Image (cartoon, helix red, strand yellow):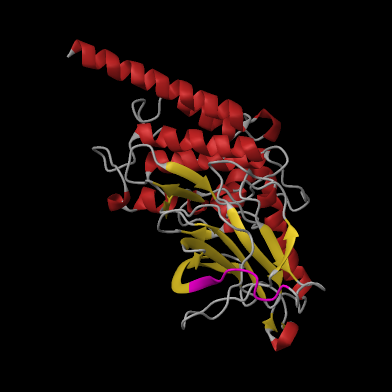
């Protein structure tokens, strides 16, 4: 889900919600029945249908979906919203975006997911299942959810901005003399990103790691807080690992996230879009068939120290099993940061 979610993240209070038309705002009505999610830090609950629905009607607090659109992906849109007095991100699954033939969902609602609301609902449940396993400071928190058609939605913590905006909007955060994100900040973001992946792996593969899905708080500082957004989408061509271009490969392993993370590091270092102007087929041929990788030669050692360069090259190994684990990659970036800090202290003493 490509998005840039603004405003401060809310507290993780509450777990049931009703999202309806409130004071003229567009919104979604969440069923009040709750079904346990899993081991989230806030212990949110998923609302759905069932025999208790009538008895519990109106039990949940309202989630107001405001007009502002924050992002759009293959299966839905993300809006700014209000939940229990806090600003949140409301992800509404949009049947008009889902690829398939026409159909009619519950209560006459239009459905284009093969006419099968259960299939679209399963997409939502997949995302909830993933988020239900995760409790980590660098992963976006799920606060509430509705899994009953025709209103399918997730309520998540809201972040200030995305890594994509930090890279390409010069006014969104710190810059060095060349107008790029300072190396210190690149390393800090990379460390937190790999820490989030280490928490997900090996049970969960992100599958769509890219700057729009790396959300940030305190982006104006040299050390922003990373919040990785997890969603069920299946990859964006410039970030797809070579093995995932194989049409006979039906399993996406967590090793593919490490390839994508290497691309994200390259993008932060260069300030350029990876494989810009290349179509899907072009990227597949160059990466999977020819074994080409994004150029590192344009980066001087002071911008990309040798240890950082080696890490990126390891992330781009053709053999997925030769790529470093996320925890190992985080440790490597910590070592690079320590080397830079020692060099900076040495220069300060000499001056």
Q: Observer-nearest residue: 261 or 62?
A: 62
Q: Observer-nearest residue: 139 or 41?
A: 41
Q: Position of residue 212 (x, y in %)?
A: 48, 54
Magenta stretch, main secondary structure class? loop
Q: Residue furthest bottom?
A: 108
Q: Residue at x 48, y 55 (%)?
A: 10
Q: Position of residue 234 (x, y in %)?
A: 65, 55
Quarter holding the N terminus is bottom right
Horizontally, residue 93 falls left or right of residue 86, namely right
Horizontally, residue 41 falls left or right of residue 268, namely right
Q: Quadrant of residue 142?
A: bottom right
Q: Position of residue 50 (x, y in %)?
A: 80, 72
Residue 214 in the magenta stretch? The answer is no
Q: Position of residue 321 (x, y in %)?
A: 70, 31
Whether residue 104 is visible, yes or no, is no
Q: Residue furthest left?
A: 351
Whether residue 55 is visible, yes or no, is yes
Q: Quadrant of residue 301?
A: top left
Q: Residue at x 60, y 66 (%)?
A: 74
Chain part drawn in magenta: 56-65
């Amino acid at each position: 889900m490509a998005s840039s979610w603004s405003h401060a993240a809310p507290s993780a209070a509450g777990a049931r919600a009703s999202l309806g038309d409130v004071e003229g705002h567009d919104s979604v009505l969440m069923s009040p029945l709750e079904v346990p999610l899993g081991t989230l830090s806030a212990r949110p609950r998923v609302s759905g249908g069932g025999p208790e629905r009538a008895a519990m009607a109106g039990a949940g607090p309202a989630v107001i979906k405001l007009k502002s659109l924050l992002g759009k992906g293959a299966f839905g849109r993300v809006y700014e919203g209000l939940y229990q007095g806090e600003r949140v991100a409301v992800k509404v699954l949009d049947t008009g975006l889902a690829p398939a033939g026409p159909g009619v969902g519950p209560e006459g609602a239009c459905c284009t997911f093969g006419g099968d609301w259960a299939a679209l609902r399963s997409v939502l449940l997949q995302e909830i299942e993933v988020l239900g396993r995760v409790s980590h400071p660098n992963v976006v928190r799920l606060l509430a959810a509705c899994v009953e058609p025709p209103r399918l939605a997730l309520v998540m913590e809201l972040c200030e901005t995305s890594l994509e905006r930090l890279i390409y909007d010069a006014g969104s955060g710190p810059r060095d003399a060349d107008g790029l994100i300072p190396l210190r900040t690149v390393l800090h973001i990379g460390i937190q990103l790999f820490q989030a992946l280490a928490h997900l792996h090996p049970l969960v593969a992100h599958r769509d790691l890219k700057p729009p899905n790396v959300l940030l708080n305190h982006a104006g500082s040299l050390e922003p807080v990373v919040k990785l957004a997890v969603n069920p989408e299946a990859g964006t061509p410039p970030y797809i690992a070579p093995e995932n271009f194989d049409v006979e490969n039906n399993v996406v392993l967590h090793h593919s996230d490490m390839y994508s993370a290497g691309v994200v590091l390259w993008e932060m270092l260069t300030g350029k879009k990876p494989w810009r102007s290349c179509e899907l087929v072009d990227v597949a041929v160059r990466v999977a068939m020819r074994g080409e990788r994004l150029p590192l030669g344009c980066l001087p050692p002071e911008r990309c120290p040798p240890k950082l360069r080696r890490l990126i090259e390891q992330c781009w190994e053709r053999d997925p099993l030769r790529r470093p684990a996320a925890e190992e990659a985080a440790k490597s970036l910590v070592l690079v940061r320590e080397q830079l800090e020692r060099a900076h202290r040495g220069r300060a003493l000499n001056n």
